[in-house]
Amino acid sequence: MSKNFELLTQFEKNRQLFGEATPTSEPAVIEHPEAKFGKSFQKAMMKPVELGLAESTRKEVAKLVQRVFQSCQNGAAPHAVMFCGIEHGDGTTWISAQVARTVATQGIGTVCVVDTNFRWPTLHTYFGSRNDLGLADALRDTKPIRNFLQIGNIPNLHVLSSGAHADASLTLVPGRMRDRIAELRAEFDWLIFDVPPVEQSGEAVVLGPLVDGVVIVVSAHTTRRATARMAKESLETAQVRLLGTVLNNRTFPIPESLYRRL
């Protein structure tokens, strides 16, 4: 899978992707936010991170992290962000993993990455973690959330995998999920949620109001415009805050180095 992507922040780009209808909430990009960490946050987030990725990809991940976590609304920057695709195979899990690793590596706080994708649970594989105990077990049990966490393979990072006996219906009970997310908020500074595609599940609509915002992942050349528009509208109907849209698997008709100079 190509790792070329960009966060769509300009109104015209979103209009072209989602159609002619004017969006009710344009993705917010704040250059100088009044966020928790101020300028130190901005400086840290722009630092490329050594994650075994190509330099251009590392920079794109850093820019994505900076823009998403500096999207302020009423003076509040998001600390719990959900990433969801439109269709299976959009690359949401890969992006969620890289975002979590990037934030954790900056050393500005503790991070937990959560796999709510009970249908295709692969997030744990990016961190060398197990999947014999995780979120599904926490939703069935009453033990503190820390009993279901695993330490990630880099400092400041914990992983909450989906669990070996995950049942998609568990995520559709907002009360229990709300309690567990509240526990995670108390334990960590930053939460990253990998969520199943909007078109193929209802988890995004249920979980969206429980977090600070959602980033939609669409795949270049494969995601249908009408499908993306309907997914966006369903999230807005559920009063989910849209932070932005990531265009993944982008290809360059001309060399990338020349494309970036245009």
Image: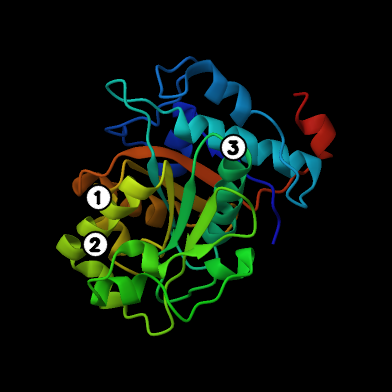
* Residue nearest the observer in this picture, 148 or 85: 148
* Residue nearest the observer in this picture, 171 or 134: 134
Name which residue type carries label 3.
Answer: Gly
Quarter of the figure with residue 125: bottom right
Task: Return the residue at label 2.
Answer: 177
Q: Position of residue 129 (x, y in %)?
A: 58, 70
Q: Residue at x 30, y 47 (%)?
A: 211
Distance of label 3 from label 1 (alpha carbons): 26 Å
Regarding mark 1 in the picture, which secondary structure is present there? helix
Q: Position of residue 37 (x, y in %)?
A: 47, 23
Task: Return the residue at label 3.
Answer: 107
Q: Residue at x 41, y 24 (%)?
A: 36
Q: Position of residue 228 (x, y in %)?
A: 40, 52
- Residue 253 is at least partly visible in this image: yes
Residue positioned most to the bottom: 165
Q: Horizontal placement of 125 versus 52: left or right?
A: left
* Residue nearest the observer in this picture, 15 or 151: 151
Regarding mark 2 in the picture, which secondary structure is present there? helix
Task: Return the residue at label 1.
Answer: 210
Kindly check if marks 2 and 3 are in contact, taking CB atoms under 8 A apart as contact.
no
Q: Residue at x 66, y 38 (%)?
A: 60
Kindly check if marks 1 and 2 are in contact, taking CB atoms under 8 A apart as contact.
yes
* Residue nearest the observer in this picture, 176 or 67: 176
Mark nearer the viewer, 3 or 1: 3
Name which residue type carries label 2.
Answer: Met
Quadrant location of the C terminus? top right
Q: Residue at x 43, y 83 (%)?
A: 164
Quadrant location of the N terminus? bottom right
